[in-house]
Amino acid sequence: MKKLIPFTLAMALFVSTKTKAQEHRFDPPWNNPPESALNFTVPGIDNIPDLYGDIENPQLTVFFAGNQFMVVDDLLTSFKKEYPQYERIFVETLPPGILAKQIKGGSITIGNLRITHKPDIYTASKRAINDMADYFSHTQTYCYNNICLMIPKGNPANIKTLNDLGNSNVRISMPNPLWEGIGEQIKASYKKAGGEQLVKKIMEDKVKDGSTHLTKIHHRESPMRILYSQADVAPVWTSEVVYQKLIGHPVEGITIPDSQNTTATYVAAKLKNAPHAQAADDFLKFMDSPTAKQIYKKYGFTID
């Protein structure tokens, strides 16, 4: 019996350690962190995945629509090669509605950090940019995207169509339309697939019973809920499925028919009061280059 106690304790510690490791195996940041003397990223506690680059005295500040976080590594590396004078760049990839509030209010607090940087460039859907037209001196379209369904590898809930999301036993990770532009577009797809009845079922009834989870940071939260078996399906941009598969995460995508889908047009806008006007102009020029277009294409966006 005495010999069994250390063995049992060892097994318990092994299972506990393995379980804790599994809890964070899919946690962001998924980008490559910038080089530094010390990297202090703690999974599940301190990872700050949607603030990227140099926050101290940046030479260019870009507020990207959050679902484009995956392009940041390649995009900034290529931009710096073509414009080596810009060494310090700060990027935020929060939901576009949150970024819009930050632009209008002039600041944001995340945890204990208060940020008052004014962006030089803001990227969002065409509709969101049009709603804030008075803030911008120049705008340009640079890519497109459409919606698909992200599911766990193997599709255990046997999801096939948008109408399946109305089933009471299907758990959905759904972007909140209050700050995620994709939310309204997904609701439009629900209506095309199953009418107002399906919209009500998913956005009201299932929200009340907890089987529809409304996200706060859709582009991070939805993949994580799928990967950690907290959701059976998540309507997302096609680029998000492409990216998760590129980094080896066990997800699959279900195509939504064109008749039920929506294409988003992404626009980059230069702020009228851009602190770094020349840098903003250079970045917009780069965004229209073949190099930038190929980067977006790599991650599942369309460029024409």
Image: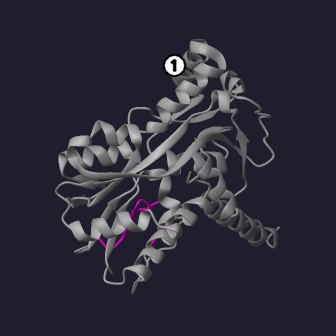
**Residue 101 is at least partly visible in this image:** yes
Rendered view: 19 above or below 42: above
Residue behind mark 1: 204
**Residue 26 is at least partly visible in this image:** no
Q: Give the residue drawn at x 41%, y 56%.
A: 93
Rendered view: 290 above or below 206: below
Check the picture and name the quadrant holding the N terminus.
bottom right
Residue 172 locus on image (x, y percent): 61, 33
Residue 103 locus on image (x, y percent): 24, 49
Residue 262 locus on image (x, y percent): 57, 34
Magenta stretch in the rendered image: 41-55
Q: Give the residue drawn at x 65%, y 40%.
A: 148
Residue 36 locus on image (x, y percent): 40, 83
Secondary structure beneath label 1:
helix
Of residues 232 and 186, the one drawn nearer to the viewer in this rendering: 186
- Residue 283 horizontal side relative to residue 158, left or right: left
Task: Indicate yes or no whether the magenta region holds residue 156.
Answer: no
Q: In the figure, residue 232 lies in which quadrant?
A: top right
For the residue carrying disc 1, how many other residues have a C-alpha within 10 Å: few (<14), some (14-19), or many (20+)?
few
Q: In the figure, residue 164 lies in which quadrant?
A: top right
Of residues 126 and 206, the one drawn nearer to the viewer in this rendering: 126
Task: Indicate yes or no whether the magenta region holds residue 51.
Answer: yes
Q: Give the residue drawn at x 81%, y 68%.
A: 4
Question: Mark 1 belongs to which amino acid?
Answer: Glu
Rendered view: 191 above or below 291: above
